[in-house]
Amino acid sequence: MINVSVVGAGQTKFGRHPEYDLRELFSIAALGAIDEAGIAPEDVEAAFIGNLSSDRFNDQCHIAPMMVDFAGMKGIPATKCEAACASSATALRAAILALESGLYDIVLAAGVEKMSDLPTPGVIETLAKAADNTFEATPGITFPGIFAVLAVAHMHKYGTTREQLAAVAVKNHANAVHNPLAQYQKEITLEKALSSRMVAWPLGLFDCSPISDGAAAVILVRTKDARKYTDAPVKIIASTQASDTMNLCDRDSLSTLYAAKTAAQKAYKQAKLEPRDIDFAEVHDCFTIAEIIATEDLGFFKPGQGGPAVEQGLTRIGAEKTINTSGGLKAKGHPVGATGISQLRELYLQLRNEAGKRQVPDADVGLAHNVGGTGASCAIHICQRW
Amino acid sequence: MMSSETTILNYQALLNERKLCAAECPSCKTLMLPPRLFCTKCHKRGTRWKVLSGRGKIRSFTVIHIAATTHAADAPFVVVVVRLKEGPSITARLIGVNPLKPEDIKVGASVVADFEEASGPTSDQPDMRLVFRPYLVHK
């Protein structure tokens, strides 16, 4: 069991932010979390910051010291964590391990990404570098292409349909209407989702998460100290991570993510819970197929049943298994390095009854599933109401 | 080249000779593609090249419509993951099919390896890249 709790969370609005530099986005999220924890920047003893590619997106390496300095935390150890789109969940894990070690009492975990500094083709190229550049990016596969290969395999094996994929987008857009920090707060119809322009067959534009800028941050302390900071801390009761081959071609199955299944099994064991005990989850829907596979890998539905489940409305708010109340990566936005912490913030809000019109009724336990790259990394966190 | 170390650089050099090779463990005979220096099963070093037939079946595929800048001129194009007859699996382009008719491309269909000059910056001796094309029985 993990003995760490969240006592503050902050996030910028996700979307296009031409008006802000990377460090400014970070400082808005970090100081939001610090304010909410009722502490000062000087109280933070260490920071772990998720980011995929400030070097390519923003022409800037070694960002962690720059981030903490700009947010008033000059001098503390500041470390960047990179695991593609799971970067900030690995930053979160590093922060948890730092607290568990007893070295620190107050740690910041954050994530930041500013993708829109590059024109779209450059973003596509940068994201493709999170696949094996020599063996899979070089033949021309893109990130949507990677998940399209998984979609075709899933469709072939289980009969999953494009309508079921589109149902994920429709649901997540509907949830995002109630998330003021989401990139798109607008519903879409199934027809619109299905008629969008093709990106990587069978995935169209509305099967894909957008290009986003944004940052998210949380303040973590050991659970025994948590009530000093807030009346309603949120306990982290599991933190796991697993890896897989970078290459799709090296995998036995193309319709599941081994790293996600492995991390999930370990997380359930760590928390002494079963998939049925999870009231709601934020899952990594970088593409619609990824949400369907996630709900199967996490044991919420049997392999092949993820598609029918979303089509039948079983993953809507308050239904059998609520998935992606925030709007998910699809509609909330996906500034890749910030996504993992943003998922954790949604768990934090839900477990404090602060999620407004998207609140899950009677939610006691939530799970966050953050996938990196081709699925070569996955980190899972389970949180519980105080 | 066939006696060279099973490095990624040498794998490409063999492709340039129009040979698709996997690394084979001298001890447990495990075949590895992409090639590796150490056996994935018994972790022994000393893997050697084994030429593959190039025959295989489509495990999955996609049609890339929106490509990275470096591949934009080729779009739309098909990328396949192929399970080779000898066991290993590899990702490459599929040529000789209509990318605008993905419904005609079938998981499980037989394909065969071919080699084409890689597009991109020209040099005296451009690298060859692995591609697959449909394997036609009447050919």
Image (cartoon, helix red, strand yellow):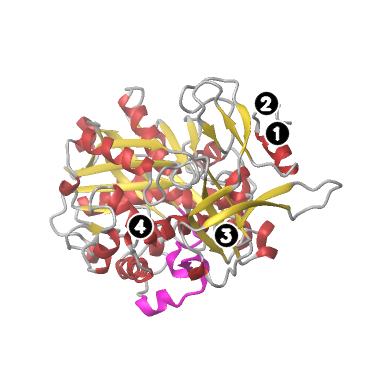
Q: Are marks 3 and 4 on the same chain?
A: no
Task: Tell me if label 2 and label 1 are in contact, CB under 8 Å.
Answer: yes
Instruction: Give the quarter of the figure containing the N terminus of chain A.
Output: top left
- C-alpha distance separating marks 4 and 2: 38 Å
- C-alpha distance separating marks 2 and 1: 7 Å
Q: Is residue A293 above or below residue B1?
A: below
Residue furthest front in the image: B138
- Identify the chain of the residue marked 3, using the numbered disc in the image: B
- C-alpha distance separating marks 2 and 3: 36 Å
Q: Is residue A183 above or below residue A74?
A: below
Q: Are marks 2 and 3 on the same chain?
A: yes
Q: Name the quadrant containing residue A175.
A: bottom left
Q: Is residue A284 left or right of residue A317?
A: right
Which residue is denoted by mark 4 in the rendering? A157
Name the spot of residue A286 as percent of width and height, x first.
42, 57
Residue A197 in the magenta stretch? The answer is: yes
Give the residues in magenta: A188-214
Three-letter amino acid code of the residue under disc 4: Lys
Three-letter amino acid code of the residue under disc 2: Glu
Q: Name the disc covering residue B137, or none.
A: 3
Three-letter amino acid code of the residue under disc 3: Val
Instruction: Give the quarter of the figure containing the C terminus of chain A.
Output: top left
Q: First in sequence: mark 1 or mark 3?
A: 1
Task: Tell me if label 4 and label 2 are in contact, CB under 8 Å.
Answer: no
Q: Name the disc covering residue B10, or none.
A: 1
Q: First in sequence: mark 2 or mark 1?
A: 2
